[in-house]
Image: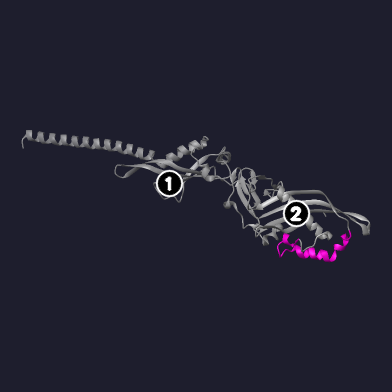
Amino acid sequence: MSKTQKRSSIGFWVFYIIFILVLVGFWIYFLNGVIKKDLAIYEAAQPGHVMEELVSKIQEGDLSSMNFVESSSRFESPDVYKDAFTAAIAGKTVTFKENETSYDSNAPVYELYADDAHIATVNIKSVSSEQLMFILSVQEWEIASVTPLYEAGSNEVVIEVPDSYTVSVNGVAVDERELVGEPTDYMEFEIAAQYVEVPKKLTYSISGLVSAPSVEVKDAAGNVVACEQDGNTYTAGFAGGEVPADIADSAVTNAKNISDIYAGDRTLSSMKSLFPEDSYLIPLFQNYINHDLWMYSGHTTPSFSEEATSNYIRYNDSFYSVEVSFVKTMYLPKRSMTVHDKTHNTYYYANINGNWLIVDMISMNEE
């Protein structure tokens, strides 16, 4: 081989080696830069960075991402719970860690802590995805929800009312969700319940309130009813009102006629139409006539004074009660004495077959 051919061969291999080194160096430089860049992008796109931003905002007092409506009682404003939450994390360090049972890579779940206290659950979701280097998936994340966690409030309220009444707590209507147990009977309606539908007592209970509640009770007519309060229990009875003129007149007349039975001025048979046929009152009247009527025998014509009606309560369209009071004065010649017989009773009227009948009487006289 000639010297010229040897030099040419050596030059080729030198050039070739240099070319290969340059090419390899180029690809090493290029791939190194691309890989570093893609890895940086991949790292920056991890959901942990979204959590770091969230924690930073919460630590600064920005709770706009938190849904206090979801976690609050419907009887209290979300602001009440927001204020309680703010106070609970004040001065504490907020941290996060992924939920151990979070398996969905597109919707990871994280837990927030204030020092050691668990304060919130965070749901994150992927809103876009891009492939890098055919093996890495870069996702864009956003907060799906932040549910604050805290201990329930210590305030509880129990409300006992007739079933025809409505109740609101902090301006929010109470309904069957707050009912406790079954409706219970009012003992004062035990007799009337044999003839007509009567009210029953409902008990509502609400617990976990942060603030002391404001309770309002209204009767069937929409009138506000005063409640008796014993600790955290509110009880509303039946609120009496003004007696309609026609009911007042008939109530006084009937009460006077019943008093005439006791004085022997009216027969029991003439009054039976005012009571149900099986009324427990008829045997009581008859027993009085048989044994005690002699006390008022031989009296002069009686006179009535201090007539009054009050406390009219319409429980429903077929049932009402009314108080009647008066003083009946009689002179007894055989005993040379004047007696003043005071009547003060509550009369319960029920509509039976279209007629308003007295189904029960309760004495209101002080013993």
On screen, residue 149 versus residue 364, left or right, reads left
Using a 10 Å C-alpha cutoff, classify the residue at mark 1 as few (fewer than 14 neighbours), some (14 to 19) or many (20 or more).
some
Residue 66 painted magenta: no
Across and down, in percent, residue 9 comes to: 11, 36
User: Of the numbered discs in the image, which one, if any, rests on residue 108?
Assistant: 1
Residue 289 painted magenta: yes
On screen, residue 60 versus residue 316, left or right, reads left
Work out whether mark 1 precedes mark 2 in sequence or the reverse, and give the earlier one.
Answer: 1
The one nearer the camera, 207 or 253, is 253
Q: Quadrant of the N terminus?
A: top left
Outermost residue, left side: 2
User: Image quarter for residue 193?
Assistant: bottom right
Q: CA distance from mark 1 to mark 2?
A: 69 Å
| Secondary structure category for the residue under label 1 | loop
Using a 10 Å C-alpha cutoff, classify the residue at mark 2 as few (fewer than 14 neighbours), some (14 to 19) or many (20 or more).
many
Let me know if residue 230 appears in the view: no
| Secondary structure category for the residue under label 2 | strand
User: Of the numbered discs in the image, which one, if any, rests on residue 129?
Assistant: none
Q: What is the three-letter code of the residue carrying label 1?
A: Pro
Question: Could you tell me which residue is drawn at 53 percent across and 45 percent down?
Answer: 71
The one nearer the camera, 164 or 22, is 164
Across and down, in percent, residue 107 comes to: 41, 46
User: What residue did someone put label 2 on?
Assistant: 346
For the record, the magenta segment spans: 271-298
On screen, residue 104 versus residue 354, left or right, reads left
- Chief SS of the magenta region: helix
